[in-house]
Image (cartoon, rainbow, N blue to C red):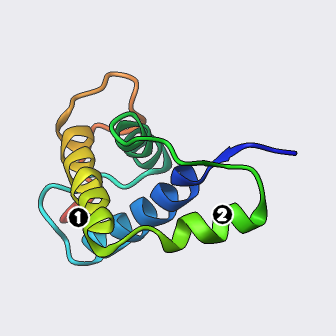
Amino acid sequence: MKVQNIMVSYVTRRTNTLYDEFSAARKSFVTCSCENCRLETICYVLNRLPPKYVVSGRGVTHTSLSLNGQAKADIDSTIIAGMRAINVAKRPYHWSSTKFFSTT
């Protein structure tokens, strides 16, 4: 048997979707959408959400269905807060110091 936190896969999928949507819409707070920024956002969100552990495939299906509209909205809100926090923070180890949407 394998124990897994289904929040990891849900948050990862949703974070990537929101980064793609906001980057395409050229939202001002998304200055970078590299893999490192996405991973840091995922960690930010997972550290603020309660885990949902399951053992079987049946558990994954049952728990996925139990995320109601409000829970999904709360997760999206936390992801957006994470995107803002990660993109605002100046990190010396980040691969680029330039903005994602350059005019050149």
Outermost residue toward the right?
A: 1
Badge 2 amino acid: Val
Tell me where residue 37 sits by quadrant.
top left
Q: Quadrant of the C terminus?
A: bottom left
Going 68% across and 62% down the picture, which residue do you hit?
59
In the image, 103 versus 53, the foreground residue is 53
User: Mark 2: few, some, or many residues within 10 Å (few <14, many ≥20)?
Assistant: some
* Mark toward the start of the polypeptide (2 vs 1): 2
Q: Is residue 87 above or below residue 15?
A: above
Q: Is residue 92 above or below residue 58?
A: above
Going 74% across and 43% down the picture, which residue do you hit?
3
In percent of width and height, residue 99 lies at 23, 50
Which residue is labeled 1 in the image?
Answer: 104
Please name which of the two marks, 2 or 1, marks the residue nearer to the observer.
2
In percent of width and height, residue 13 lies at 50, 64
Q: Circle 1 — which element?
A: loop
User: Mark 1: few, some, or many residues within 10 Å (few <14, many ≥20)?
Assistant: few
Give the distance between the C-alpha atoms of the residues marked 2 and 1, in whole angstroms.
46 Å
In the image, 80 versus 47, the foreground residue is 47
In the image, 2 versus 103, the foreground residue is 2
Which residue is labeled 2 in the image?
Answer: 60
Going 42% across and 65% down the picture, which residue do you hit?
14
Q: Is residue 35 above or below residue 91?
A: below
Q: Quadrant of the N terminus?
A: top right
In percent of width and height, residue 76 lies at 28, 62
Badge 1 amino acid: Thr
In percent of width and height, residue 53 lies at 61, 46
Q: Is residue 59 above or below residue 83?
A: below
